[in-house]
């Protein structure tokens, strides 16, 4: 196996998702040949603004906006075919070229079925401790994958297999839906008809992704693996149980695509200049004052998928350092720094206390997180707008100090700073 020819990179979110990865992926995809998604599903939403036109992506990598790029949906992604077909059609209508040449789907991706969406809603409704899921059927689909009754793209395109696997599933799910949740039965024939129509559309896009990426690497092509959600939504290392159902960390790029991890040689971590989270779960630096509304309005902090208002808070360096360690981040991207313009004093969380005592190490017991208090370092903000700054040296000194504190605390350089939603609103360093 040719190990490293060019840079094969993974880009991941270091907070609770919504770090602004979409824009950075769009920016970085300019210089790569392949863009690969490896986990999650249409719970994700990336917004990219090009020449004033807004594109929202849920499944297809945003690299599709650029010519001559190959976009791949790996086996680790859970695919809702209804959403995927709709996304293909919508992008085509906007003039984006999408063909089996520039969009490849793994035969091994699991499908989100209508009963997964039903079960997501029913389970969430019945829970006392709600997670606040996106209700897109993500969790139930991953459950079926692990209990080995999932339906994959390779099954969808084979009418006999689809029939028999769907039959088993509908039988089982109807017991759950009717007897446990007291809800309406699922119709086998309706799903079969609907999914058979998706099969025809999606079949030409199916590919052996392992061979595809092997050949790409061998031929000195560069690959960018794009993570969805963020490290604290990771099912193992996040704020469990308030997490998503996949591994969102960089290491999963390999499992979710079949590309060897020894051939991935750079991890880029994206963090916002402050913190947000959607859904339930602990959030130590959440702001409960007017600044929360200020950040939400100025940063347009509303979910790209569900439209839900995001909870807003100060940057948490304890969490950021943890994410850097888990993912092995080589390079940081700081986004939305402009949102902090004209704030007199900015708080940065540099530790936690519990019952008046400083906590040593990382607080592992998530159940206690609502009782821990952030310890803040307050720094001077800057006045004026930085949206049009493109040269690092031209940033106000307070903004450069802010960047330096993050670098010192995490030990990782910030190489890209994003200062606005426009494609060109970035400052490159190094
Ligand atoms: P699920 O992924 O729909 O099961 O939702 C589980 C948790 O992850 C909920 O708190 C969601 O709000 C959150 N979540 C899932 N996807 C995203 C995302 O792309 N951005 C931010 N939060 C997300």
Image (cartoon, rainbow, N blue to C red):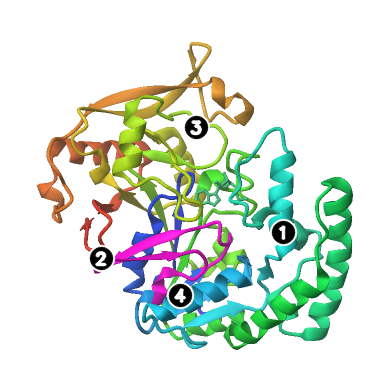
Say which of 205 and 255 sits in front: 205
> Neighbour class for label 1 at 10 Å: few (<14), some, many (≥20)?
many
Badge nearest the viewer, 3 or 4? 4
Q: CA distance from mark 3 to mark 1?
A: 28 Å
- Is residue 8 or residue 34 the one in the foreground? 34
Residue 227 drawn at (x, y percent):
49, 59
Residue 1 seen in the figure: no
Tag 3 residue: 283
Q: CA distance from mark 3 to mark 4?
A: 36 Å
Q: Is residue 243 visible?
A: yes
Of the image marks 1 and 4, the number of the one nearer the N terminus: 4
**Which residue lies under the disc numbered 1?**
116
- Dot 2 lies on which element? loop
Q: Earlier in the sequence, mark 4 or mark 2?
A: 2
**Residue at 51 percent of width and 52 percent of height:** 306
Q: How many marks?
A: 4
Q: Which numbered disc, 3 or 4, marks the residue that appears first in the sequence?
A: 4
Dot 4: few (<14), some (14–19), or many (≥20) neighbours within 10 Å? few
Few, some or many residues within 10 Å of mark 3 (<14, 14–19, 20+): many
Residue named by callout 4: 90
SS state under label 4: helix
Task: Give me the C-alpha separation between circle 4 and circle 2.
Answer: 17 Å
Q: Which residues are magenta?
A: 37-64
């Amino acid at each position: 196996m040719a190990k490293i020819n060019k840079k094969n990179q993974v880009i991941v979110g270091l907070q609770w998702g919504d770090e602004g990865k979409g824009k950075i992926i769009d920016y970085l995809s300019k210089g790569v040949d392949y863009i690969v998604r490896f986990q999650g599903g249409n719970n994700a939403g990336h917004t990219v603004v090009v020449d004033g036109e807004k594109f929202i992506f849920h499944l297809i990598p945003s690299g599709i906006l650029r010519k001559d790029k190959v976009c791949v949906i790996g086996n680790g992604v859970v695919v809702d075919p209804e959403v995927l077909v709709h996304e293909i059609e919508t992008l085509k209508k906007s003039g984006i070229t999408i063909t089996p040449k520039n969009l490849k789907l793994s035969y091994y991706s699991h499908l989100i079925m209508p009963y997964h969406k039903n079960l997501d809603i029913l389970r969430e409704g019945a829970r006392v401790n709600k997670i606040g899921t996106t209700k897109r059927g993500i969790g139930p689909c991953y459950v079926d994958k692990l209990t080995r009754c999932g339906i994959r793209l390779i099954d969808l395109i084979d009418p006999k297999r689809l029939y028999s696997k769907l039959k088993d599933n509908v039988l089982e799910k109807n017991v759950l839906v009717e007897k446990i949740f007291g809800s309406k039965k699922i119709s086998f024939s309706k799903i079969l008809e609907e999914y058979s129509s998706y099969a025809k559309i999606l079949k030409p896009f199916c590919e052996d992704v392992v061979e595809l990426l092997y050949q790409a690497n061998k031929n000195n092509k560069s690959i960018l693996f794009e993570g969805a959600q963020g490290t604290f939504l990771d099912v193992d290392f996040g704020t469990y149980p308030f997490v998503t159902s996949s591994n969102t960390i960089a290491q999963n790029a390999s499992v979710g695509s079949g590309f060897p991890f020894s051939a991935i040689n750079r991890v880029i971590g994206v963090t916002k200049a402050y913190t947000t989270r959607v859904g339930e779960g602990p959030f130590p630096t959440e702001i409960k004052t007017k600044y929360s509304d200020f950040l939400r309005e100025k940063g347009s902090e509303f979910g790209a998928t569900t439209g839900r208002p995001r909870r807003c808070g100060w940057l948490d360096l304890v969490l950021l350092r943890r994410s850097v360690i888990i993912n092995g981040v080589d390079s940081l991207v700081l986004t939305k720094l402009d949102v902090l313009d004209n704030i007199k004093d900015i708080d940065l969380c540099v530790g936690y206390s519990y019952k008046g005592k400083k906590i040593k190490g990382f607080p592992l017991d998530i159940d206690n997180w609502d009782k821990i208090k952030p310890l803040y370092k307050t720094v001077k903000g800057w006045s004026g707008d930085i949206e049009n700054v493109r040269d690092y040296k031209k940033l106000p000194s307070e903004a450069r100090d802010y960047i330096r504190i993050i670098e010192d605390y995490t030990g990782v350089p910030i190489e890209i700073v994003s200062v606005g939603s426009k494609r060109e609103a970035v400052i490159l360093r190094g």
